[in-house]
Image (cartoon, grey):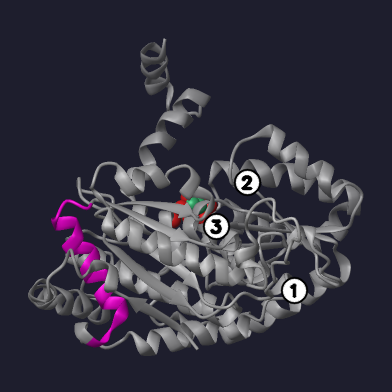
Amino acid sequence: MGITLKLNGVKNFVREDELAKIEPAVKMASDLLYSGKGAGNDFIGWVDLPFNYDKEEFERIKAAAKKIQANSEVLVVIGIGGSYLGGRAALDFINGNNYNNKKHPGLPDIYFVGNSISSDYLNDIVEMIGDRDFSINVISKSGTTTEPAIAFRIFKKMIEDKYGKEGAKDRIFATTDKARGALKSLCDKEGYETFVITDDIGGRFSVLTPVGLVLMAAAGIDIDAVMKGAQDAANKYKNDDLMNNDCLKYAALRNILLKKGKCIEILANYEPSLTMFGEWYKQLFAESEGKDQKGIFPVSANFSTDLHSIGQFIQDGSRNLFETVLWVEKAKKDLIIQEDPENVDGLNFVAGKSIQYVNSKAYGGTFLAHVDGGVPTMVIEIEKTDAYHFGQIVYFFEKALAISGYILGVNPFDQPGVEAYKKNMFALLGKPGYEEQKAELEARLN
Ligand code: PA5
């Protein structure tokens, strides 16, 4: 059981001695991380999280999930960025991206809001809930982020109108800072059940905290298996021996490829249920490495869908990219292609074969074509998309990113760049204290 890194697709691009040369930098990065002496060392709580998570809170999460399952047909999950992407990636990865459309007796539909500022989107969700029973899981570490705060206003009113203030209290679950922030104050005042995002874990590293676990448990996901997967990955990748550690190799090769001008990484998958995992990866890597005018620009691609669009560019466009493929070895349930007596589409040569088999040949063919086209390609094989493997792959990427960031020479745990647009938006919206900037920005926009 597990995940495996395959490096045949980088052999033509990276020499053995280049990997050997980067070994000291990898060791240094590993030392920085485990000694807690590296930049951003206030935010490395995720390193040991798979072992030292709050066990009492973990049981409360399971109890809350049971309560939600018993009294709600819908769970509205409110959050953005690190308070959204990981949980949604988990739901899709493990339960499939059609979870809400499939039968799941005894489990609520899960709707995500507060991850954009679209009134059409919010109205659709209100309409989809209709008169069904629902609960809310509002997630915000700071408790002050605009998008989820606005969405919470709307759904708090809706739930209070439906169940009264007392009834709503039983249906609102908040995940936030243990002591600070507007959301925490509100929870204390209203008596909502709260779960904690600890100070030493940044948003994009928080999927294995209550941020992701509450909704996973509500959707029937085995959160013990998720944590077991993360534990096994933490143990497996703890050593600092580059030649015997896939996680370190991946981190090192990214940096070697960057030095060769490969400044774009495409995380490609062959499963629609991994689309949101690609979105989670983009935040994790972009916010962590894209700073000080450095970094690899992370993008994601969903194959074979995107082979019919950006596939042309990957094969034949600017040669400044490399690819990391997530390949899932076993389908949850396979399907056999039937023989067609008329064979109008000429596809009888795949009759009797499974869809997974055809997908594997699409993957093999694409891999070779992209390598031949000058795209260094690493492959991460995942045995299957269950809770255990989700925990493993999350930890693999979190650790690889931290090591990669330290090799690159950045603080992988801050995100100073995300403040710039927020300041402008607040000024343009007329937030008190931003009066001067408002006039100046409006003049520039006209
Ligand atoms: O990684 C981050 O820090 C951000 O993406 C945050 O998670 C995001 O802005 C949401 O913040 P908060 O949880 O404070 O509402």
Q: Nearer the viewer, residue 257 or 148?
A: 257
Q: Which quadrant holds residue 385?
A: bottom right
Checking the image for residue 276, the label placed there is 3
**Callout 3 environment at 10 Å: few (<14), some (14 to 19), or many (20+)?**
many
Say few, some or many: other residues with alpha carbon within 10 Å of mark 1 (under 14 / 14 to 19 / 20 or more).
many
Is label 2 or label 3 in front? 3
| Residue 395 spot, x, y in % from top left | 42, 76
- Lower position in the chain sequence, tag 2 or tag 3: 2
Report whether 242 appears left or right of 326.
left
Q: Mark 3 vs mark 1: which is more N-terminal?
A: 1
| Number of numbered discs on residues | 3
Q: Residues within 10 Å of mark 2 (few under 14, many from 20)?
A: many
Residue occupying image coordinates x 45% and y 26%: 427
Q: Which residue occupies 74% across, 42% down?
A: 154
Q: Which residue is disc 2 drawn over? A: 114
CA gap between label 1 and label 2 equals: 21 Å
Kind of residue at badge 1: Ala
Q: Is residue 37 visible?
A: yes
Specify the segment rendered in magenta: 244-262
Residue at position x 39%, y 43% in the image: 312
Q: CA distance from mark 2 to mark 3?
A: 16 Å
**What residue is disc 1 on?**
65
Q: Is residue 234 magenta?
A: no
Coordinates of residue 219 in the picture (x, y in percent): 72, 70
Secondary structure of residue under mark 1: helix
Q: Image height check: is 26 above or below 300?
A: below
Q: Secondary structure at mark 2?
A: loop
Q: Is residue 185 left or right of residue 13?
A: right
Q: What kind of element bears circle 3?
A: helix
